Amino acid sequence: MKLYDYFRSSAAFRVRIALNWKGVAFEQLPVDLPRGQQLSAEYRAVNPQQLVPTLDTGAGLLSQSLAICEYLEETIPQPPLLPADPLARARVRGLAQLVACDIHPIANLRVLNRLRHDLTVDEPRVGEWIRHWIGLGFEAIEAQLDPQSAFACGDAVTLADVFLAPQHFNAVRFEAPLDAYPKLCAVVSRCNELRAFADAKGGMKVAQISENQRN
Ligand SMILES: N[C@@H](CCC(=O)N[C@@H](CS)C(=O)NCC(=O)O)C(=O)O
């Protein structure tokens, strides 16, 4: 498989974790977001939304990280990323969607650039915007985590963790305060000890991130 990817994209990071978890070898095709490569006609033909990730499965192109992860789960069921019980599955999806639908999109590059360039919001207030929405989402996640569980939904890794760890990475990148979310941080540090998560980070160095924080 081939993944249209950007190393600092948290949506692509989710898919890299899921591919690693399922043991799928994949080739990374970098799309340079800060340079606007996602806006090229060439990439629009791949992904009409002009966002990463896109997964080229060999049988067809897939966009949207949650749909891609669910596709991987359906085609490669082992090791699982969804529990068997329908109630637990819905809870996992609920947490994944909380990240994917309600936290991440509001601080996406194109949203931030609209704030910066079209609405002339200054950089400190852009930072405040990002941290506000991360805080609101993390508060809701923290309230749903069971301190007795190793991971976000029980003692096995699920899609909830696959979505949470990259969002936590973003929170660190944007210097969001995390002290109020001890359960969330404990879950993410357990995830980060796992090979599938650590390898998916793919050379994202904290120093590099704060240097390029505005991208
Ligand atoms: N809902 C999409 C979000 C994809 C997305 O927003 N990707 C970001 C990177 S994390 C992107 O490509 N941004 C480019 C831009 O904003 O121009 C998914 O989950 O795949």
Image (cartoon, grey):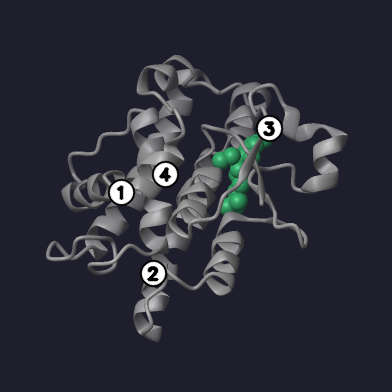
Find residue 92 and name its label. 2
Q: Nearer the viewer, mark 1 or mark 3?
A: 1
Element type at mark 1: loop
Between discs 4 and 3, the one toward the N terminus: 3
The answer to whether residue 132 of the structure is visible from this angle is no
Counting residues from the start of the chain, the first of labels 1 and 3 encountered is 3
Tell me which numbered mark, 4 or 1, is placed earlier along the sequence. Answer: 4
- Label 4 sits on a secondary structure element that is helix
Tag 1 residue: 194
Give the residue pinned by disc 4.
166
Per the model, the C-alpha gap separating discs 2 and 1 is: 19 Å
**Label 3 C-beta lies within 8 Å of the nearest ligand 1 atom:** yes
Q: Quadrant of residue 192?
A: top left
Circle 4: residue type? Pro
Residue on which the image places disc 3: 31
Give the class, few, some or many, for how many residues have Cα within 10 Å of label 4's Cα (few <14, many ≥20). Answer: many
- Rendered location of residue 201, percent (x, y): 43, 37
Whether residue 184 appears in this view of the structure is yes
